Amino acid sequence: MGIVFNSTANTITLHTRNTSYQMKIGNLDYLLHLYYGSSICDADMSYQIMQYDRGFSGNPYESRNERTFSLDAQPQEFSTQQQGDFRTPSIEIVNGDGSYSFHGKAAAHKITKGKYKLDTLPSTFDTEADTADTLEVTLLDAVTNIEVALLYSVFEEADIITRAVRVKNLGNAPVHLKKIMSVCLDFLNGAGMDLVSLPGRYGQERQVERQHMTHHIHTIGSVRGSSSHQQNPFVVLCDRDATEDYGKCYGFSLVYSGNFLAEIELDQYDQLRLVMGIHPKQFVYELKPGEVFEGPEVVMAFTEHGFTGLSHLYHDFYRTNLCKSKFVTEVKRPVLINSWEAAFMDFDDVKLVNIAKAAKNMGVDLLVMDDGWFGKRDDDNSGLGDWFVNEDKIRCGLHKLVEQINALDMKFGIWFEPEMVSEDSDLYRAHPDWAMQIPGRPAVRSRNQLALDMSRKDVQDYLIEKVTAILDGADIYYVKWDINRSLTDIWSNELPGERQGEVYHRCLLGLYRVMDEIITTHPDILFEGCSGGGGRYDPAMLHYYPQYWVSDNNNPIDRLKLHYGTSFVYPTCTMGAHISDSGKFIPLETKAVVAMCGTFGYELDATHLSKKQQNICRKQSSLFRKYYHITFKGDYYRLTNPFEPGNMTAWMHVTKNKKEALLSVVVTNLTCNGPQEYIKAKGLKPDALYRVNGGDEVHSGAALMNAGLPIPREVPEYSAFQFHLTTTR
């Protein structure tokens, strides 16, 4: 059993294959956190909690004259509100009498087999191959009858623990949630820890930042209505000396696509607290008697094997336990070409067919018709929301166009941006109240478009009907689902003024309903997410999409950093990566090596390529298919850090049985008469012999990992190399 209750010590221990997590129903029935880290078997870690009279620390009234017990210094599983703990709380609630207080004590717990399920939010799931158990601990405020259920699921083989929270109003009056965190983790000593996060901006998403913990509250979050380009709902707490291969690392990944917050506080006693959940900005959620609120899931992982070890845990888990699409494991992803950079919105059916014919010579499997095919859409100032085919452009009709593409033995894909509306559209003229606008105030435009109020059921129903009609009206194989602005003017005409603090979250629930109705009912369609590039690249989106567009920035040298940061938590099989005209002086071969660290495809006008260039692309497409089983299913290793000085960036994929590997190198900085460069491999069998690129060159795994492969020096700028390694026996 992955979860054990010790009735003598009053401890509950969660065990995975290599880790343990322990809590205790402690003094006065407060739920205390004891341990998270490498396996401790059946040890009772209660001895670690030392209690002193700290001075000026509040003591629960029930402790009477005992001054050594203060929640301000106790490690807790769910930090309380107005109970003497002045650190960042897990919950802020306004009770029916106007008081701000939650005094939660452990009232019950139960252990069940299998993974818990969330009714309103996407979450991970267990499979037949998993050993999964669930713990539910109920905290009850006996005065207000507010119940908080802490949910934990243990995936033993995967070394993963997931957490979520449910709040239920068992009282007689409405209450208002103003903050609810899905995870709280207290470390008894965090002074020697670092915080790693993935900040960025449009075109430069998920860069990597590392900082020492100091006696402040460090915050990572988004208030843009989505997880955003600027931050990602993933953080790592690690040893000060942790590296790619060594050191303790704790990962926290939030399965949520909206406003989020992670707060990490190093307190006066060098204790460290992390909380993570929905951002409290403009969040006030009413719970009437009997109602339940679910907080999003957090996926936690721990390893002593550095950042690579942590990434492998998340990659394996997210490949098997996050998205149910058959394209994750059963069906190979196609090589696609997207019309955007080839034609933008200036195209017709004839032009698209000509692009497809040229792309066929490049080994492409799928043509994607991007923005501009619907409504009155010749630029980005009109047409959004009018999801019907513009027959002035697609004169033969969508069904006939798809048939022409299929006749070339190619599949067809299409672009949507369902969550947005143009003021110059039939939809807006008919339903201006469907757009989010604060009454009496002009709306903030972004890309000259407004956001639909996704909290409204009539908006959801409209989108489900219109998008489904397009998908069912032709043989659509692929959908690119885009969103191109952050949310402002947060207001819903469907809610009274006092409940506008619910709009952000209700919009997200509405979006998830639309996606459930469209995506899960079309299992044979490959869906790819996009948000002005990678502005909503998070686990909740990957619950629906097996892949997500990493960034609108296709420059392959910039992509080296983008792929590096994204890979800290997300597997490369989820990374949308294409070859484009960006980086005009960078060889096609180099662009292909970078794009093979992802889903692979093209964003260019195939009709403008020479026969020689088309032949190069055809060979690249064949290589992508040849190495697919390595790059999509193998273990990923970051061999160099592109954020540090160096002359090249390298990475590799290794099959699970370690019999095959693909090592990729891009030369980024040529120096005159510089030293010979060697790239050391990782993840190979030391005693195995590996053949290099099918030739006569053979080296042991130990030699490749400890001495490395020499990289040719006299090469053109931005050259790239791939070394296909296969065992000789």
Image (spheres, grey):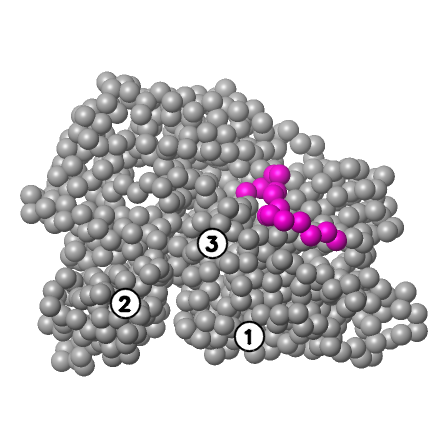
Q: Residue 19, percent across and down?
A: 56, 66
* Rendered image: mark on residue 618: none
Q: Using the numbered discs, state the Cα–Cα distance from disc 2 to disc 1 in whole angstroms.
A: 27 Å
Instruction: Quote the CA–CA distance across marks 3 and 1.
Output: 25 Å
- The residue that appears at 35% across and 65% down in the rendered structure is 637
Q: Nearer the viewer, residue 696 or 394?
A: 696
- Mark 1 lies on a secondary structure that is strand
The residue drawn where x is 44% and y is 75% is 246
Q: Which residue is mark 1?
A: 193
Would residue 609 appear left or right of 70 to someone viewing this image? Answer: left
Quadrant holding the C terminus = bottom left
Mark with earlier residue (3, 2): 3
Q: Amino acid at mark 3?
A: Phe
Comparing 651 with 627, the one in front is 627
Farthest front residue? 729
Disc marking residue 649: 2
On the image, the x and y values in percent for residue 122 come to: 55, 43
**Residue 265 image position (x, y, % from top left):** 63, 68
Instruction: Identify the residue under disc 3.
Output: 317
Q: Which residues are magenta?
A: 109-122
Is 446 on the left-hand or right-hand side of 287? left
Disc 3 vs disc 2: Cβ atoms closer than 8 Å? no
Q: Quadrant of residue 378?
A: top left
* Amino acid type at mark 2: Thr
Under mark 1, the amino acid is Met
User: Where in the figure is residue 38, as x and y percent of width and height?
Assistant: 56, 71
**Front position among marks 3 and 2:** 3
| Residue 378 shown left or right of residue 45 in the figure | left
Residue at 71% x, 68% y is: 75
